[in-house]
Image (spheres, grey):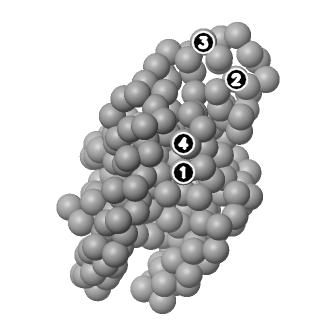
Amino acid sequence: MRNLEFQIKHKPIKRLFDICFSLSVLIIGLPLFILISAVILITSPGPIFFKQKRVGRGGIAIRCYKFRTMSISAEAKLEEILKSDPVKAKEYQKFRKLKDDPRVFSFGKYLRKTSLDELPQFFNVLIGNLSVVGPRPAFFEEVEEFYGDKAHKILSIRPGITGIWQTSGRNFLSFLERVELDEIYVDNQSLKKDICLILKTIPMLFSSKGAF
């Protein structure tokens, strides 16, 4: 990623809220964590968790954790799909995801539609890599391709598990539209707005609209 000047923004109240909220979710959700882990082990060979390198605050590399939703040969399958199917290649270029993704196993599809696959990211919040609410945690190549002069602003704060783009269309939005919404969030963030976005996110967990 090209060199950028980052003015890191520190918000102690936001960080305190993140710690308290994520601890509550992890404690209350422990039985659900155990159940999901067991079903993954039964339905798909491979590890329970999946980790990916993303861009964190200040442009540093972080590891984001999720429940695994894809087969263990997912990367090879993606390469094959993008080479052999121009329609899916165009879809992936625009959304960075595939709606009918053959790499995702059956229970993984359910986890994605309900966003339950992202529950382990509350561990990321605890250690300070993520915030509960913030810009989407992007890949380095996505920052290079789509962020442009917005990078220094968006990467000045921690990325979030949820955010304004997730409550405004989710995966139906193009990547450029998500970047625009992330910039709006950074310009207007407050604890009150974070709580409103969390409340808007909760009903999204029970709807598969825009989730894939």
Q: Earlier in the sequence, mark 3 or mark 4?
A: 3
Question: Percent from the top left, x then y, of residue 13?
Answer: 29, 85
Circle 2 Cα neighbour tier, 10 Å, few/some/many (<14 / 14–19 / ≥20): some
Circle 2 residue: 89
Q: Is residue 206 visible?
A: yes
* Identity of the residue furthest to the bottom in this view: 192
Circle 1 Cα neighbour tier, 10 Å, few/some/many (<14 / 14–19 / ≥20): many
Tell me the element at label 4: helix
The circle on residue 168 is: none
Q: Is residue 151 left or right of residue 85?
A: left
From the image, state whether disc 3 or disc 4 is nearer to you: 4
Q: Is residue 93 left or right of residue 186?
A: right
Q: Cβ–Cβ below 8 Å for labels 3 and 2?
A: no
Circle 3 residue: 80
Residue type at numbered disc 2: Ala
Q: Earlier in the sequence, mark 1 or mark 3?
A: 3
Q: CA distance from mark 3 to mark 4?
A: 20 Å
Q: CA distance from mark 1 to mark 4?
A: 5 Å
Q: CA distance from mark 4 to mark 2?
A: 22 Å
Residue type at numbered disc 4: Gly
Circle 1 residue: 111
Q: Residue at x 37, y 48 (%)?
A: 37
Q: Look at the image and tell me in which quarter the N terminus lies.
A: top left
Circle 4 residue: 108
Q: Residue at x 42, y 52 (%)?
A: 36
Q: Earlier in the sequence, mark 4 or mark 2?
A: 2
Rendered position, 55 above or below 29:
above
Using the rendered view, name the quadrant where residue 77 is placed. Answer: top right
